[in-house]
Amino acid sequence: MAPSAPPELVLEAGRASRNYWRDLWRYRELLGFLAWRDIKIRYKQTVLGVLWALIQPIVTLAVFTFIFGRLAAMPAGSVPYPLLVLCGLLPWQLFAAAFSNASGSLVANTHLISKVYFPRLIVPLSSVAVALIDFAVVLVLLTILYLWWQFVPDWRLLFLPLFILLTLVTALGTGLWLTALTVKYRDFRFVVPFLLQVGLFLSPVGFSSANLPNWRQIYSLNPMVGAIDGFRWCLLRGEPVLDPLNLAVSVAMALLLLGSGLWYFRRTERTFADII
Amino acid sequence: MSSPVISIEGLGKRYYLSHQAPETLRDRLTHGVRGLWQRMAGGEPRPTQEEFWALRDVAFEVNQGDVVGIIGRNGAGKSTLLKILSRITEPTTGRVRIRGRVASLLEVGTGFHPELSGRENIFLNGAILGMSRAEIRRKFDEIVAFAEVERFLDTQVKHYSSGMYVRLAFAVAAHLEPEILIVDEVLAVGDIAFQKKCLGKMQDVSRTEGRTVLFVSHNLPSIRQLCRSAILLAGGRVQSTGPCAKVIELYQHGLAGAAPTAVPTPTADLRTLAYATGIAIETLDGTLTDCLPVGCPWRARVRFCIATAQRDFVVALGLKSTDGTAVQTAWLPPQNLAPGDYEAEFVQDRVVLEAGTCTLLVGLSSGDRGLQQFEAARLDFTAEHARGYYAGTSGVGVVLNSMQSSLRRL
């Protein structure tokens, strides 16, 4: 893709390509194409099509509002309870989709990995990108709820991209671990739905984390706590106050996951084609 | 012009053969958490596994503009070599230096998605093979014309016939513009006319554009047609390199040399039933041979011993080509045989087979029970001294001129 004269390429055991990151950049179009492919085929031969991206959050929204808002009667401050839940669901669903896509991505693209060279990181990255599409659809739902309650977000909305990034970093970090491990041990396929199920209850999706009196820092070790709190802070006019220390714990944890995920992925990447 | 664009030294690739079921996490856990950690961190596996060197001490150079054929029997390491050169897997030992952009075509239509249309797949496949969007757009019309699928561009690929699929896939690949093109046995698919078109395209590419091509195939005629030099791999090592014709000859000779020519020793069980005792292949005047000019009639005589009376005893003879295709099968009708020594004769004077190497298979059976089946000999049909008119071109059938044909003026 780069028209420049190619330098000499040396292939040797254990020699990490010095140009890995440059290669990754060169193959950015492939990243786009793979994401585009997955989006294109996602709703092929379905009747409801992209509506599926709405049905799931709407049902979850209704159930959570009923359970946490009505049965458990959790406080929501001055915010309508469904709005509170949706602002937790948004990042959670983004995480869940990105994480599970990324975890299965290498095995799903076995035929590519065993036949063509490209920086393997392209595969989980593109699958994370795909999750953004469903996320955008759910944003439409948020807009509808805003209109319904005539709720107008304030300047804090501008910080939303940062928390989207935090969610994606968390999903990519965990996804890289899982997808690299799944190449070798298919056991980890079963771990993904399990983690998502447990994670849903360990994250403040159906309630506000402001309800937790103490242990907040330890709770924030789950990076999704920081992401969800951040989303609510941005979208609900700073309603649950964002504690910088808790947020820092979550961000640090997310970065740790991404760093270690990248390390493990890069370390095992060379053998993917042999064992996949 | 003659600087090496690929130079390989001491190249080796080791795989581990596991004799048990594929490893699962539980296996690892029972071997201790420490071992698991080592393994996850990419450490060496347990020494109890058997090693297997798919490639060993491979060294050669390829100059710019060379078209090199890589030949060898199945399992000789051809595909592993290509995988290393295309960076899919890394070598265990040795070093490869490559100067130039490499595109590899180990499979036709890598990444094609059946749900996408032809048009979309051109872009997707192009990107996977390393083309940029702009490059694909520029060559789009050319690709479509080459593939001859204009009318079906917006049809989902899953509705394509397999021929159309292959044509489209190859068309994308043929328009790659790398300095080095690595092609595995991908032309074996598609009809003959299209194969020729592909070969022509590859020839153009190497001749006019000075591109280096590495080409793996079992199809010796197309190697001969395309390549100036060849590399023969055997058991993961380079057995020979040099001019194409010489290496191919050595390869064919090796194939013949490797063939057993005697009957196997019967087991104790068979000794009490029936077993082959000898086989002879000869021309009709009785000269023993394993090398026959195309069109020359020949016969095979199979001797066998019946130890106890056999019901519905059948002697069968088969010819198998080097690529594994069963070419011809013949058998005597089932008959009841009393104990004694017998000789079955099969005469080949009706069917003319194309030049090439065949394996002669012999089978003995009684009723429903197979008694013996073995490769009895390796037969070479050669173009030299062929009987009658013999065009000797590639692309002819396995069976030549074995029809009643006549011409009359109307």
Image (cartoon, coloured by chain):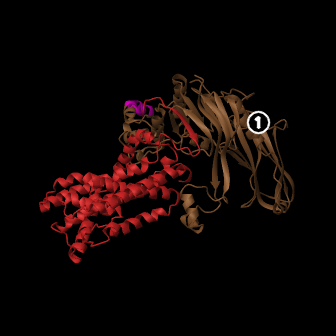
Chain colours: A red, B brown
Q: Quadrant of the N terminus of chain B?
A: top right
Q: Nearer the viewer, residue A160 or B91?
A: A160
Dominant secondary structure of the magenta stretch?
helix
Q: Quadrant of residue B214?
A: top right
Q: Position of residue B335 (x, y in %)?
A: 77, 57
Residue in the image at 38% along x and 59% along y: A253
> In the image, is B218 to the left or to the right of A221?
right
Count of numbered badges drawn on the protein: 1
What residue did someone put label 1 on? B297
Q: Position of residue B171 (x, y in %)?
A: 46, 35
Tell me if I can see residue B400 in this picture. Answer: no
Kind of residue at badge 1: Pro
Tell me if I can see residue A124 in this picture. Answer: yes
**Above or below: residue B18 compared with residue A215:** above
- Residue B139 part of the magenta-drawn span: yes
**Above or below: residue B336 compared with residue A114:** below
- Residue A39 part of the magenta-drawn span: no
Residue occupying the far right of the picture: B340
* 10 Å crowding of disc 1: few (<14), some (14-19), many (20+): some
Q: Nearer the viewer, residue B393 or B311?
A: B393
- As helix, strand or loop, the secondary structure at mark 1 comes to loop
Q: Position of residue A222 (x, y in %)?
A: 35, 64
Residue in the image at 55% along x and 67% along y: B26
Residue interval drawn in magenta: B138-146
Residue occupying the far bottom of the picture: A71
Q: Quadrant of residue B230?
A: top right
Q: Nearer the viewer, residue B354 or B3?
A: B3
The answer for which chain carries disc 1 is: B
Q: Quadrant of the C terminus of chain B?
A: top right
Q: Position of residue B221 (x, y in %)?
A: 63, 32
> In the image, is B81 to the left or to the right of A83?
right
